[in-house]
Image (cartoon, helix red, strand yellow):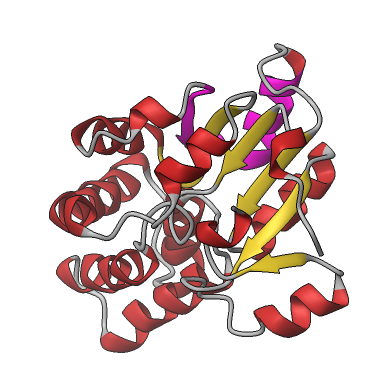
Amino acid sequence: MQIDIRKYKTIVFDCDGVVLDSNVVKTQAYYRTAKQLGATDAQAQALVDYHVRLGGISRYHKFDYYLREITHKPVTEKAIQALLDVFARELEVVLVECQVAEGLNELRQATPQASWMILSGGDQQEIRTLFAKRDLAKYFDGGLFGSPDNKDTVLAREKENGHLQFPALFIGDSKYDFEAAQRAGLDFVFLSDWTEVTDWQDYCKHHQITVRRNLMGLL
């Protein structure tokens, strides 16, 4: 399906697997985080499996599930914070080094009419610090948003305050990205090159989702 990228007033980008090739390093970081805090190999792998299955969902939710359903330990603020702190340290180095999507600058030049927004399952302050450090924040004049607010909450809020103007497009690489876009009334494009959704071809075909390999495919 052809996409007229120039018609959109707002373009919303997921971060991991869309703007940054960071899905794999984040998945590995979940495993190492669990192991550092005493998990068995099986428990660490169960967290990874849950993370991959719920691509685009906040780490706060995943760690809550990990404690409650995998390790069967009390879900306390202290326990969650310990996981968050180790995970953040694991990501600090690798996110600075992972590849930025080719074509980002060209796409920005091709869509001067659009406000650009990052909407990630990652930690909001982490994303803002990282994008400033990597000189990427300049592209996203519509803001950089992440957890602990989920994507539905952010989209609803930005619609209500008028920052998210229609027609709008969401570019993502997870099932949750598509579902959030649908609930908020945004068009959607699925990027396949870096996705961790194993059945993405069947899923996109079933839901008649427009697919491109990467951002260059939108030019």
| Residue beneath the point at 57% across and 26% down | 112
Q: Position of residue 90 (x, y in %)?
A: 18, 58
Residue 186, image x, y percentages: 79, 41
Examine the rendered structure and indicate whether residue 8 appears above or below residue 48. above
Q: Which residues are magenta?
A: 142-159
The residue under the point 25% across, 30% down is 132
Residue in the image at 80% along x and 27% along y: 166
- Classify 55 as above or below 128: below
Percent position of residue 37, x then y: 19, 65
Residue at the bottom extreme? 42
Q: Is residue 35 magenta?
A: no
User: Quick check: is 158 in the magenta stretch?
Assistant: yes
Residue at 72% x, 13% y is: 162
Task: Please tell me which residue lies in front, 177 or 31.
Answer: 177
Q: Give the total number of marks visible in the rendering.
A: 0
Residue 140 in view here: yes
Q: Is residue 122 visible?
A: no
Quadrant of the snapshot with the N terminus: bottom right
